[in-house]
Image: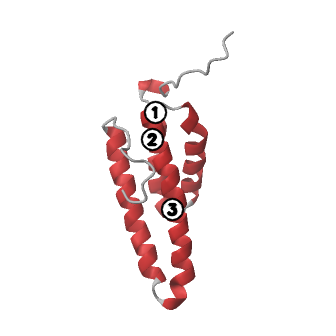
Amino acid sequence: MSDAPNPPVAQAGGDPFGISKLVYILYFIGFVNGITTIAGVIVAYLKRGESTPAAASHLTFLIRTFWIGLLFAVVGAVTMMIMIGMLILLATVVWALIRLIKGIMLAMDGKPVPDPETWLW
C-alpha cells in the first residue's frame, strides 16, 4: 500500500465539471427558495478536494460567491433603515447573477475560472 494521495478523478459520466454545474444550478434555484444555495455551498466544500484543478477553481469561485454575497446581503439588510439597503441588495443580486452566468458558461466550455478568488467577476 502506498501513502500517496489518490489523484482527482472525473465525475460520473466523464464530466469533471459535473459537480460544479450542479452547484451553479443549485445557486440559481436559490434565488427563488434560498435553501438550495446552502446545499450548494455544502456540496462545493465537500467536493472541492477531490475535484480536478479546473473544477476546483469553479468550486472555490462558488464558495466565495456565497460568502461575499452573504456579507453584502447582511450589509444591505442592516442599511435598509437609511434607504440605501435596497440599492445594496439589488447590486448584490446583479453581481451574483453576473458571476454565476459567467462561471457556468466557463464550466460548460470546460474551462477553469481564471481568478477564482476575485471579488468581482
Q: Is residue 11 above or below residue 91?
A: above
Determine whether the residue tagged by mark 3 lies in a helix, strand or loop: helix
Determine whether the residue tagged by mark 1 lies in a helix, strand or loop: helix
Whichever of labels 2 and 3 marks the residue nearer the N terminus, that label is 2
Query: Which amino acid type is shown beneath numbered disc 3?
Result: Ile
- The alpha-carbon separation of the residues under discs 1 and 3 comes to 22 Å
Place of residue 40 in the rendered image (x, y in percent of width and height, measured from the top left): 55, 49
Quarter of the picture holding the N terminus: top right
User: Can you name the residue that lies furthest to the top here?
Assistant: 1
Left or right: 45 as drawn, with respect to 24: right
Mark 1 and 2 residues: CB-CB less than 8 Å, in contact? yes
Determine whether the residue tagged by mark 2 lies in a helix, strand or loop: helix
Place of residue 64 in the rendered image (x, y in percent of width and height, measured from the top left): 50, 54
Residue beneath disc 3: 68
Residue beneath disc 1: 53
Query: Which amino acid type is shown beneath numbered disc 2?
Result: Ser
- The alpha-carbon separation of the residues under discs 2 and 3 comes to 16 Å
Q: Would you call the spot at circle 2 few (<14 residues within 10 Å), some (14-19), or many (20 or more)?
A: many
Number of numbered labels in the structure image:
3
Place of residue 12 in the rendered image (x, y in percent of width and height, measured from the top left): 49, 26
Residue beneath disc 2: 57
- The alpha-carbon separation of the residues under discs 1 and 2 comes to 6 Å
